[in-house]
Image: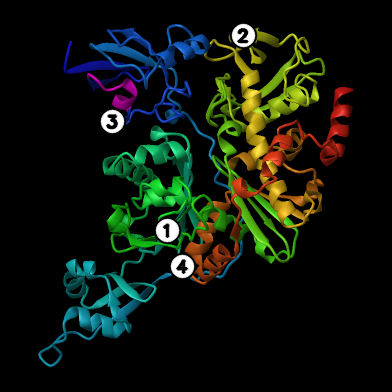
Amino acid sequence: MSGKHQIKVLPSGLVLQVDEGETVYEALLRNNVPIEVVCGGKGVCGKCGMRVLKGVSSPPTAKEEKWAQVLGSDVRLACQVRMLSDGVIELNQAAATAKAKILTWGQEVKTEVDPTVTRREVLLPTPSLEDQRADLERLLQAVGVQSYDGYLLRKLSDCLWGSKFDVEAVLYDGELIDVRPKVPKAGVYGIAFDIGTTTIVGYLYDLESGKLVSVRSSYNDQIRYGEDVISRIEFASKGQENTSKMQDAVVGTINNIIADLLKTANIDKDDVYDIVCAGNTIMASFLLGSSCYHSSRTPYIPSFTSPVRVKARDLHLNSNPSGYLRTLPSISAYVGGDLVADILISEIYKHEGPVALVDLGTNGEVVVKTENDFMATSCAAGPALEGYSILNGMRAVSGAIESVSISEDGNDVYYRTISDDRPVGICGSGIVEALAWMKIRGIVNKAGRIVENSSKRVIHSQGELQYVLVYEKDSKTGTKIVITQSDVRKLQVAKAAIFSSLLTLAKLCNVDVKEFKKLFIAGAFGTYTDPFYATVLGIFPELPKDRYTLIGNGSGMGASLLLLSKDKWDLAKELAKRVKVVELNLVKFFKDEFIDATFLPHKDEQLFRATLDSISKLRRT
């Protein structure tokens, strides 16, 4: 029993070769097999559950024994198991293959179409003994530019002579990047990308008309190396090989999306000349090959914050090799280009204030704008609110509970799942609604404790109280779907991070949160979450409904705006410089604000008086 072993992976039936000494998780990653993981393979999250159906494996580790009490005695963790012989394993989940619900919609800002890429028809004088100018110099002179991409010399002469010197020149910000025959159906295209920690969305545009041609999305393949930014940085910092894997993962996802976009629109990849990417600073750094090691340690200095422009061929992108990929300007190590995009799309900079913006995805960013101040900060809010680290939490894929309500006596639960499949788990919007209704029905109290005997669905299990949303007979997996006391604690911490961040920035700007004239909400979690339930839990401040404005995928829309309008780049760079980043750990009163915000909805009930009155009415219905 040494060397290499073969294992069959169910339910896919894929047969893999595993090196003795490597974990099953490592073997799955190496073979591009999707597997749910949150902690980056540390045995902490319990998401990579599997069963060894045949074969000899290493004994359970201490971490596995702990999770066995929750997952079941026969469940192993792929990140801990090492196979000692050939065998058969069964994965608990393969969420990456499921039908996903990824946010692609976003508020648009009207702009004049003025792209960086243009094309020009050129009829050149035919060379002769009297006119012996070289092909390149002849074209440059006719177009009236001096800058050019040397890569086009590979095709230049054949194109000119084959087209009898009647061609199209493609220019990128004054640089000659391509020459091609005049083809009636040929166009000039660009793609805007939202590079999220969890998901990536691509928007294909006709750069001459400004028309949106197609939209496609996918999970960021970096997920295999960790669900959150910190775990990915730790993975990448172990060496250049790991950094390259992180870069390859995001570039691979981008290329897959590009291929899908082009196939759908019947467009040639060589007609795509511009790619604009918005994402947080860490995602932009991984895209360009940085390990981000120093970004994660005091004093949190990023590799770059300026917008970066690189040739598409340098990243092996599935587009014209002479085209470019550009990243938006960032603000700091943890306040990135995605927030700059949000600011552009919300046009918060036009308001005298006070106004605020909250972007809730896997990571959270908060902005407060007054007449004189423009402050922003980031908070670790997304993981629990999006389902990660929650016992039965999952991504927004088929079978995920996305909406919940609970009867007056707390004994009946009504829910809706994505794609109307039988329930498998619960995603972010469902988690918020479930906990909000638990608060409304008195199943959890102000301190966040599940109240014993408040409902027949409140049970003791694994040493803590749990509220059963779905019983075994009704779930697809044959196991209960519950909200545990530990889950509630994690949600309290996550929601407190958001509200205390917003409250802290408001106080630093000498503003009361109830004075906000507008609250712009961006990101998947914010878009799919009803503001009422978010207010019941104290995630968002108590404001009239007409003051909430959803901008959807502000990151993707901001990238689209910059793809279509070169003049907006100066504005983006100016805004990035105007925003002052607040390090919450350096604010003396933040800790107290955070603790107060862990209460449901808050320790100071006057902040949510109208909401609490509404809850009282709901309890009487």
Gap between marks 2 and 3 measured at Cα: 37 Å
Question: Closer to the N terminus: mark 2 or mark 3?
Answer: 3
Q: Is residue 582 above or below residue 47?
A: below
Amino acid at dot 3 = Arg
Tell whether 148 sits left or right of 330: left
Question: Closer to the N terminus: mark 3 or mark 1?
Answer: 3
Image marks 1 and 4: residues in contact by CB distance under 8 Å:
no
Name the residue rendered at 34%, 77% in the picture: 121
Q: Which residues are magenta?
A: 20-28
Amino acid at dot 1 = Phe
499 or 470, nearer to the observer: 499
The C terminus sits in image quarter:
top right
Name the residue beneath numbered marker 1: 304
Q: Position of residue 423 (x, y in %)?
A: 58, 20
Q: Position of residue 202 (x, y in %)?
A: 46, 49
Dot 2: few (<14), some (14–19), or many (≥20) neighbours within 10 Å? few
Name the residue beneath numbered marker 2: 461
Name the residue beneath numbered marker 3: 30
Tell whether 476 sits left or right of 469: left
Image marks 2 and 1: residues in contact by CB distance under 8 Å:
no
Q: How is the image coloured?
A: rainbow
438 or 185, nearer to the observer: 438
Mark 3 or 4, closer to the camera = 3
Tell whether 191 sits left or right of 509: left
Amino acid at dot 2 = Ser
Question: Closer to the N terminus: mark 4 or mark 2?
Answer: 4
Tag shown at residue 208: 4
